[in-house]
Image (cartoon, rainbow, N blue to C red):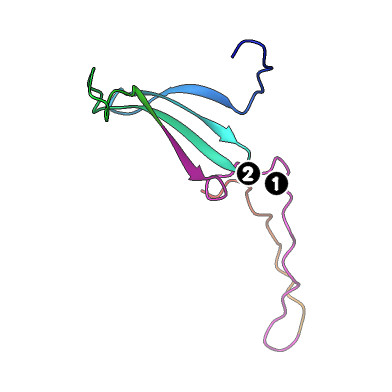
Amino acid sequence: MSGSALLQAARLWERTSAKGTRYMSGRLGGVKVVIMPNRDHVEGDAANSHTHILYFQDGMATAPRPADHTAVAPPERTHKAGRPDTRQRVEDDPVPF
């Protein structure tokens, strides 16, 4: 690597799973990146001598929410008789639960 410039591809954060396994995760553009330790690591075994495995996951399914939680007003409702609905409207909470 000497002589060539290093380009930052992603920022990674160290995490710990519920089972206590340490791993790294982050984003590379629209892709979620996870680096997990190789549980089948064996010294001297050519097929399993690597210590970590890099996984990619579609980042669209796990994309962070936009910072702007602007609610879109629903269309005005009317009663069956065609009169406007005069009940007080309550804005939706930006948190889904």
Report crowding for label 2: few under 14, some 14 to 19, many 20 or more residues within 10 A (C-alpha): few
The reply, left or right, for residue 33 in relation to residue 21 is right
Measured from the top left, where is residue 33 in percent x and y?
A: 50, 35
What element does badge 1 sit on? loop
Mark 2 touches mark 1? (CB < 8 Å):
yes
Q: Which residue is rendered at x = 40% and y = 24% of the image?
A: 23
Q: Where does label 1 land, which residue?
A: 69
Residue farthest top in this picture: 2
- The quarter of the image holding the N terminus is top right
Q: Nearer the viewer, residue 71 or 9?
A: 9
Q: Amino acid at mark 2?
A: Arg
Q: Is residue 34 left or right of residue 60?
A: left
Categorize mark 1 by other alpha carbons within 10 Å: few (<14), some (14-19), many (20+): few
Closer to the camera, 49 or 18?
A: 49
Q: Nearer the viewer, mark 2 or mark 1?
A: 2
33 in relation to 51, above or below: below
Q: Nearer the viewer, residue 81 or 54?
A: 54
**Mark 2 and mark 1: span between their CA atoms?**
8 Å
Among the 4 quarters of the image, the one containing residue 21: top left
Q: Does 57 appear in magenta? A: yes
Query: How far from the left and from the top, in percent, is residue 44?
Result: 23, 18
Q: Residue at x 77, y 78 (%)?
A: 84
Q: Quadrant of residue 88?
A: bottom right
Residue 5: x and y in percent read 69, 17
Q: Which residues are magenta?
A: 54-82
Amino acid, disc 1: His
Q: Quadrant of residue 38?
A: top left
In the rendered structure, the answer to whether residue 14 lies left or right of residue 75 reads left
Q: Above or below — where is 25 with respect to 73? A: above
Residue at which label 2 appears: 65
